[in-house]
Amino acid sequence: MTDRVPKWKPRTLAAQMLGMEDPTTRGVVPPVHVATTFIRDPDNQYRTGFVYGRPDNATVRQAEATIAALEGAEEALLFASGMAAATAVVLALDAPAYVVAAQEMYWALRDWLVREAPRHGSRVELVDMTDLAAVRRAVTPETKLVWIETPSNPLWSVTDIAAVADIAHAAGARLAIDSTVATPVFTRPLGLGADLVMHSATKYLNGHSDVVAGALATARRDEFWSRLHAVRTRYGAILGPFEAWLLMRGLRTLDVRVRAQSATAAELAHRLSRHERVAQVLYPGLPEHLGHALAARQMAGFGAMLSIRVAGGEAAAIAAAAQVRLWKRATSLGSVESLIEHRASVEGPDSVCPPDLLRLSAGLEDADDLYADLDQALRATGRRA
């Protein structure tokens, strides 16, 4: 696939959807192909390549081609959700499978790995992926898959992709990375040694809070990638054509959105780090963040996600979130509107999230307005004791 991609920079590839146009009307916006079944040729063949709507769709293919180009991948697959994409990787493994995954990651996937993956023949060990010695101890010749997320949700720890890739490959395992927060704008994990990249395309790739989707991109077409194709078809996890069309609309502005949101997050992080009602700011762009030097080395930007730990503990954090007027108290991230959430309440008793933490997703609003809203909400909780 990569050989057929125009030699344009990623921002241009996304804005023009690889230069695609409607071959019938010459329209600059690709059409939505909603057909679920297709006519056979007189000799009973399907020379168009389309047979039925569950395994494949032309609109989905166009979105996949753009994501593959942005990631420098051989190919990409879209799924009905980020969870569908992530779990497909585990379901595609031959059982019994030993999986080493990150302790800190999207909580729903961690919960699935712990509770559901064993039902499908996988044994899962959770490891601190920022501790390379611990990763080396955990990854053995029995390991089939290493799964990391960087920056990781919601503490935004940074994992050394190249180093973990070396560890995984030395043991004969694949490395898969949830790169939802970094986006291909700031990190291209396949170029650092990863085998698979996963995105919750619901987030930045779409960016408008109106699509649930997931994506996988691969460094190579191999037997395992063929197996992922089969899992998507057999489990019925393909994305719908209208959702794929909306995703393409979002991808066109991915680069400019993510860069603007990241600039806002950086400004908020620096200002909040001096706020009297904030005990700590977690953001890889801050020099005091433990992963700052590594992030600066393997990322082209620090992303638009940050978390704050509120002085006064859990009650103060919940109270501050209740006082915001501009920020939206809602789950998810990566959208044009800024979101705030008390994560421990969402994740439950098994959460690794501190109870005083608020997760912030910087949107496209003015940074001064966003800071002023947080400032009044934090001050409303009272002064630090």
Image (spheres, rainbow, N blue to C red):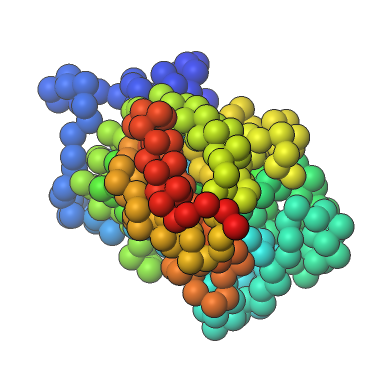
Q: Residue at x 18, y 42 (%)?
A: 33
Q: Residue at x 66, y 49 (%)?
A: 157
Is residue 86 visible in this depiction of the protein? no
Q: Residue at x 71, y 48 (%)?
A: 159
Please identify the quadrant where the C terminus is shown.
bottom right
Query: Toward the viewer: 287 or 371?
Result: 371
> Residue 6 location, x and y as percent?
45, 18
- Vertical relation: 325 (above or below) 358: above
Task: Tell me if 9 is positioned left or right of 302 in this view.
Answer: left
Is residue 260 visible in this depiction of the protein? yes
Q: Residue at x 25, y 52 (%)?
A: 240
Query: Toward the viewer: 277 or 246?
Result: 277
- Vertical relation: 325 (above or below) 371: below
Task: Tell me if 261 is positioned left or right of 189 in this view.
Answer: left
- Vertical relation: 344 (above or below) 298: below
Number of marks in the image? Answer: 0
> Residue 60 location, x and y as percent?
31, 44
Query: Toward the viewer: 265 or 218?
Result: 265
> Residue 355 location, x and y as percent?
55, 66
Instruction: Spot the residue most to the bottom.
Output: 119
Task: Tell me if 166 is positioned left or right of 80 in this view.
Answer: right
Q: Classify residue 122 by image quadrant.
A: bottom right
> Residue 206 location, x and y as percent?
34, 41
